[in-house]
Amino acid sequence: MYLKIVSEKKRLYFLLPNCLLLNRATAAIAIRALQKNAAVKEHARFLQDKRAFLRIFRELKRAKRLLRGRPLVDVRSADGDCVQIRL
């Protein structure tokens, strides 16, 4: 996963391996973090299930094959800030 954040003051680039981000251990950590946050408990009950996270991760892996280098998220603001995520 390639994460690019560009603002007027700083530029950040991260290259993170998908195998480290999209696995069962990450799903378990994310579920624990969501369970600690009370606001998320009320709005996203479906995300408290490990199987739901694994389904999301499976779809992200599938999207990687479909997108092939094109950005998954590309947000640009009026003042020139940019956030881009590629799988």
Image (tube, rainbow, N blue to C red):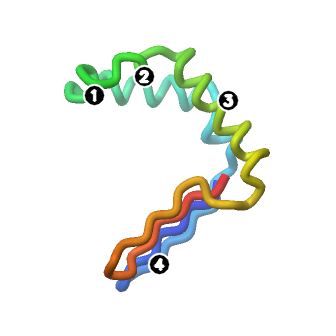
Mark 1 belongs to which amino acid?
Val
Disc nearer the start of the sequence (2/1): 1
Disc nearer the start of the sequence (4/1): 4
Q: Nearer the viewer, residue 36 or 46?
A: 46
> What residue does disc 3 label?
58
- Mark 2 surroundings: few (<14), some (14-19) or many (≥20) residues within 10 A: some
Image spot of residue 76 (x, y percent): 43, 71
Residue mark closest to the camera, 4 vs 1: 1
Contact? badges 4 and 2 (CB < 8 Å): no
> What residue does disc 4 label?
11
Please give the name of the residue rendered at 64% of the width and 38% of the height, measured from the top-left corner.
60
Mark 2 belongs to which amino acid?
Leu
Q: Distance between the residues labelled 4 and 2?
A: 32 Å
Q: Nearer the viewer, residue 28 or 1?
A: 1
Disc nearer the start of the sequence (1/3): 1
Mark 4 belongs to which amino acid?
Arg
